[in-house]
Amino acid sequence: MVSLQCVYFKMNQPPFFENINLFDIDLSLQKIIRKNNAPALEEELKEIGQVIGSEEMINHGKLANKYEPIFHSHDSKGSRIDLIEFHPSYHALMDTAISNQLHAEPWSSQKNNAHLSRMSKYYLYSQNESGTGCPISMTFASVPAIQNYMSNADVWMKGILSINYDPRNIPFYEKKGLTIGMAMTEKQGGTDVRANETVAKPIGVRGRGNLYTLTGHKWFCSAPMCDAFLTLAQTDKGLSCFLFPRWKEDGTKNDFRIQRLKTKLGNKSNASSEIEFEGAHAWLMGEEGRGIVTIIEMVSMTRYDCMIGSSSIMRRAVNEAIHHCQYRSVFGKKLIDQPLMQQVLSDLCLETNASLAMTAYTAHCLDQKESEVHLLLLRILLPTGKYYITKRASSVIVEAMECMGGNGYIEDSLFPRLYREAPVNAIWEGSGNVQCLDVFRAFTKMPELIEVIFVELEGVDNSYYKKRKLDLKQNIKNLLTNESQARFLTETIATLLQVRSMAFFGMDDSVEQYCQARFKQQINLFGNSLITNPIQLIENTYAFN
Ligand SMILES: Cc1cc2nc3c(=O)[nH]c(=O)nc-3n(C[C@H](O)[C@H](O)[C@H](O)COP(=O)(O)OP(=O)(O)OC[C@H]3O[C@@H](n4cnc5c(N)ncnc54)[C@H](O)[C@@H]3O)c2cc1C
């Protein structure tokens, strides 16, 4: 019998990109892990890379997105149930994510590189499927707020840190594992949460840990099957943070209704809903009037996860493109051997390497918990990375799609899903301008950050880089006089930090080429950078089989 692979070969069609170990082919991630001197983590990533790249997981990703979540407001006897039905593949993906601790590792593990470890696993996981990343990320990000501001945090932490995925729609105290969501955005204000109109009234005694009722709405509430959600509502003292559960403590259904699910451009496996509160019970977290301070760390961590998610889908797109070009011949020559295609692919490698390195460096800073300097640095790294990396994802994916020729545009391929997914990380958790204004505000409110950044940017020996850094140094005070320059400021810092991060992880080839491509020539269209020795850059990024 003639094998399918043989048939594809004869038709000049590359084999499917499946049953490929995603860690084994990722030479950039390997470099980062080796620099961290973490052989045990390397073994774990090898295992996860095999699972995530398997045909079975790839199929789960396809099915969970093809068969979108269905909302059931009532059961067959007319009782209100507010239930979302997911395809079994969605549950299989969630189970894989939770059993590998993608929702919890830094909070439950004793590893000194727990953030780097979780980041690497989440990066491999999201290369296959992104929608399930929403509840996973929100659960991960909720932990610091719950630990610091809930009075009975232990009860919640036990369920959140569990490695059991329990999708049953039953009260939180009966479950083997919990997931947590976040509902802040209202119709009249997403960015400007101070415009929130949902009202919270104490049921008895006011104050932290006590029960209030919520009345109002949320315009966006993703993953509405989570067991509880952090939210913001107005009390007499102003905007305050609350945790509202799906089921009340007495085992009855909490009084909030899902109105409908949003019909979205992408992110199809994930349900995003609109909800109404009708006196829903919620516990006050932290102090009344201190809602933004209470929820802000959760927001920062979801922004960090946007960096991981976008680095991840870029890498998947570039993997697919290189794989395709390795096998596909045009005019009698493999695409990978065509000089112009090498320019495009190597330029895409530069971008994915830079994004991954910056994300991994952020994870490294998060792992330095006790260090004041790293904390300060994170104040800039997080909004800068969230802005720049999520923004670059769309262009990388479009260019990689084109490397696939017509196949990339066809719904059967992965690219339409990647393409539709790409913008969401730039929009949610604070859109582009909001991140840039955050960078601007950080520098103006904490001028000491200017010095922290320039000390951080020391140590890269490249003339284009040094010139770009000097320009920034000479101009930064001027740039900080006018917020309309916030995008330029953020982009300049982001690209410098990307180089700094690649240098930190010893990606010397990428450092040189990136400085040449992005600083000397200032070109943002892929394939125009005139990279010297492009094939070497590709071979340093992707392990051909
Ligand atoms: C698929 C999806 C799922 C979501 N899930 C959730 C969820 O689970 N929970 C939740 O709370 N929210 C969720 N959101 C909402 C999301 O976080 C908000 O849509 C986002 O933060 C932007 O807020 P907005 O829609 O109100 O836009 P606006 O605040 O109106 O912003 C519109 C634009 O104006 C820009 N802008 C804002 N302020 C300024 C300024 N001062 N100067 C210049 N430009 C500015 C912004 O960058 C943006 O580009 C979700 C969104 C999507 C798309």
Image (cartoon, rainbow, N blue to C red):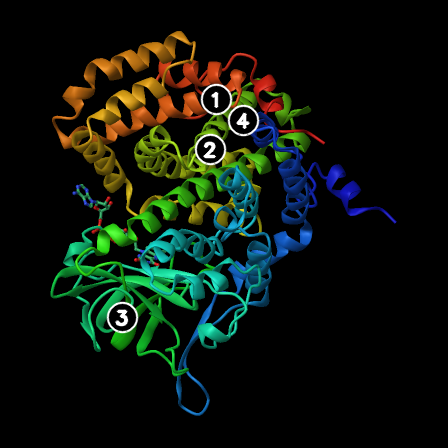
Residue for badge 4: 345
Above or below, 408 against 501 in this view is below
Decide which of tag 2 and tag 3 comes sooner along the chain: 3
Callout in the foreground (2, 4):
2
Say what amino acid the circle numbered 3 marks.
Asn
Tag on residue 194? none
Say what amino acid the circle numbered 2 marks.
His
Decide which of tag 2 and tag 1 comes sooner along the chain: 2
Q: Residues within 10 Å of mark 3 (few under 14, many from 20)?
A: some
Residue at 34% x, 54% y is 148
The residue sitting at the right extreme is 1
Above or below, 374 against 167 in this view is above
Q: Is mark 1 within 8 Å of ligand 1?
A: no
Q: Residues within 10 Å of mark 1 (few under 14, many from 20)?
A: some
Tag on residue 210? 3
Q: CA distance from mark 2 to mark 3?
A: 37 Å
Decide which of tag 3 and tag 4 comes sooner along the chain: 3
Q: Are marks 2 and 4 in contact (CB under 8 Å)?
A: no
How far across and how far down the image is residue 256, in percent? 31, 75
How far across and how far down the image is residue 276, in percent? 27, 73
Say what amino acid the circle numbered 1 marks.
Phe
In the image, 305: left or right of 38?
Answer: left
How far across and how far down the image is residue 94, in percent? 55, 59
The residue sitting at the top extreme is 463
The secondary element bearing badge 3 is classed as: loop
Decide which of tag 1 and tag 4 comes sooner along the chain: 4
Q: CA distance from mark 3 to mark 1?
A: 47 Å
Residue for badge 2: 364
